[in-house]
Structure formats: structure tokens, C-alpha cells
Amino acid sequence: MFYERIGARFVEIDENHAVLLTPVVEDMLQPDGILHGGMSAYLAETTANNAAKHKAPEGVRVVGLELTSTHLLPVELGDTIRSVATPVRRGGKIQVWKVEQYRESDGQLFNVSQLTTYTKRMA
């Protein structure tokens, strides 16, 4: 998985939340030297999707339908990101997850995202 290649690791995960820690490395930066917004979105979706499919039965696929992501503060090289996903609504096929992302250096919330997923049983 890509998130593992950049050094991210889940430190908590169950069907009701997930926490992903990610060091900010140079390949994650935009040209101005701060965390690229696409990386925040990627980490948010990765965190929520893994929680949404945690302990799903064999043959079930959980995929993202919609992701919104609001960037509040910049994140610098060398910091660590804490992504925390919690469910807003867990339905039969549709789930909605909130993801809050914090800078570990000062604990500040820098991004809020929401992921809507679809759960499908594969044939």
C-alpha cells in the first residue's frame, strides 16, 4: 500500500474509529514547501475507508463515493499527521465518516474531511 511506503501506520483501528500516523516527507509537499492538499485528502480517505471495512466479511468491498476536504492550516516538512476517522452514519450500504487531521507538533486541527462510502458484496 502507498501509505505504508511513505511511513504511515495505523496505531488504532476498529469498526468505530481509526487513527493513522504519517510523517511528512519531502515527496508529500507542494512547490511552496507545505503539505500538498491532495495528500491530506488521500490520508483522510485511507483512514476512513480502512475503518469502514474493518472486520467486513469476506467478499465485501468498501469504496469511496464522495470526499470533501477543507484545509485549515499548513503543515511543514518533518511534522507528523494524526488522522482520526469516526462514523457519522453507518447504514447498510452507505456509510459517512468524518476525518479530523492534526499536526502532532502543536496538536492543531489542520484539515477536516468527510468520506461517503458504498459497501458492495462481490460475486
Image (tube, rainbow, N blue to C red):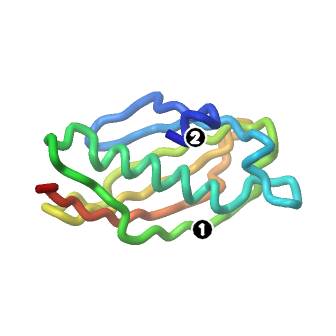
Residue 86 on image: x %, y %: 37, 50
Q: Is residue 22 above or below residue 71?
A: above
Residue found farthest to the right: 32
State the separation of the CA atoms marked 2 and 1: 16 Å
**Front-most of residues 2 and 74:** 2
**Disc 1 packing (10 Å; few <14; some 14–19; many ≥20):** some
Residue at the spot 72% in from the left edge and 58% down from the top edge: 36
Near-viewer residue (122 or 102): 122
Q: Nearer the viewer, residue 67 or 27?
A: 27
- Image spot of residue 66 (x, y percent): 41, 71
Q: Which element carries disc 1, helix, strand or loop?
A: strand
Q: Amino acid at mark 1?
A: Thr
Q: Is residue 107 left or right of residue 60?
A: right
Residue 23 falls left or right of residue 114: right
Residue at 11% over, 56% down: 123
Give the residue displayed 55% in from the left and 67% down from the top: 69
Residue highlighted by disc 2: 82
| Occupied quadrant, residue 14 | top left
Q: Is 12 on the left-hand or right-hand side of 93?
A: right
Asked if disc 2 and disc 1 are in contact, CB closer than 8 Å, the reply is no
Q: Residue furthest front?
A: 123
Reading the image, the residue beneath label 1 is: 70
Residue 42, how many percent across, how many down? Answer: 55, 55
Tell me which residue sits at (33%, 59%) in the image: 63
- Which SS class for mark 2? strand
Does label 2 or label 1 sit earlier along the sequence? Answer: 1
Q: How many marks?
A: 2
The residue carrying pointer 2 sits among few (fewer than 14), some (14 to 19) or many (20 or more) residues within 10 Å by Cα, namely many
